[in-house]
Image (cartoon, grey):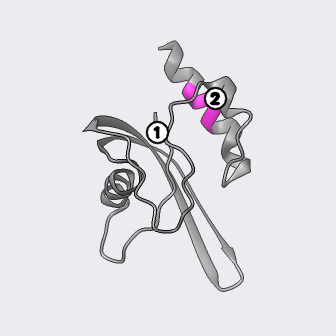
Amino acid sequence: MFIAIWGKEQEETLEKCCIREVYEETGYRCKIVKDLKGKSWAFGPVEYHVTYFEIEILDGQPTIHDPDGLINEIAWKASEQLKELQFSFPEDKEFLIQYIEQIALS
């Protein structure tokens, strides 16, 4: 399972956005396995939409392509290690950790 945050371009589907951003930010090519969860909210006049996908890595090498300087590391983490990380959306941390642990058991 891979978790990434990205920005959708105007004419892009969410799935194509995910695939593009995973490659641009990590160097991995992937495919969408399934849509996990979506949410929307507004902060003043700005609307936000977040969608989580389960993906499968197809190929590639870990490479940081980060023009904004926001990515510190590309690494695989155990669910116990994730509990110590700061999430961009902390309210989703428990959902994501539970999902990862469920996948590991199957």
In this figure, which residue is indicated by the disc labeled 2?
98
Q: Earlier in the sequence, mark 1 or mark 2?
A: 1
Residue 15 falls in image quadrant: bottom left
Percent from the top left, x then y, of residue 22? 38, 51
Horizontal side, residue 36 vs residue 79: left or right: left
Q: Amino acid at mark 1?
A: Phe
Q: Residue at x 32, y 36 (%)?
A: 57
Q: Is residue 44 part of the magenta span, yes or no?
A: no
Q: In this rendering, is residue 70 above or below 83?
A: below
Range drawn in magenta: 96-100
Label 2 secondary element: helix
Percent from the top left, x then y, of residue 98? 63, 29
| Label 1: how many Cα within 10 Å (few below 14, some 14–19, many 20+) | some
Q: Tell me the CA gap for discs 1 and 2.
A: 14 Å
Q: Amino acid at mark 2?
A: Gln
Q: Residue at x 53, y 13 (%)?
A: 105
Q: Is residue 97 part of the magenta span, yes or no?
A: yes
- Name the outermost residue toward the left: 59
Instruction: Decide whether the magenta segment is chiefly helix, strand or loop.
Output: helix
Q: Which mark is residue 81?
A: none
Residue 65 falls in image quadrant: bottom left
Label 1 secondary element: loop
Q: Residue at x 47, y 61 (%)?
A: 6
Percent from the top left, x then y, of residue 25? 41, 54
Percent from the top left, x then y, of residue 96? 61, 37
- Name the outermost residue toward the top: 105
In this figure, which residue is indicated by the disc labeled 1?
2
Q: Residue at x 38, y 55 (%)?
A: 18
Horizontal side, residue 43 vs residue 103: left or right: right
26 or 103, which is in the foreground? Answer: 26
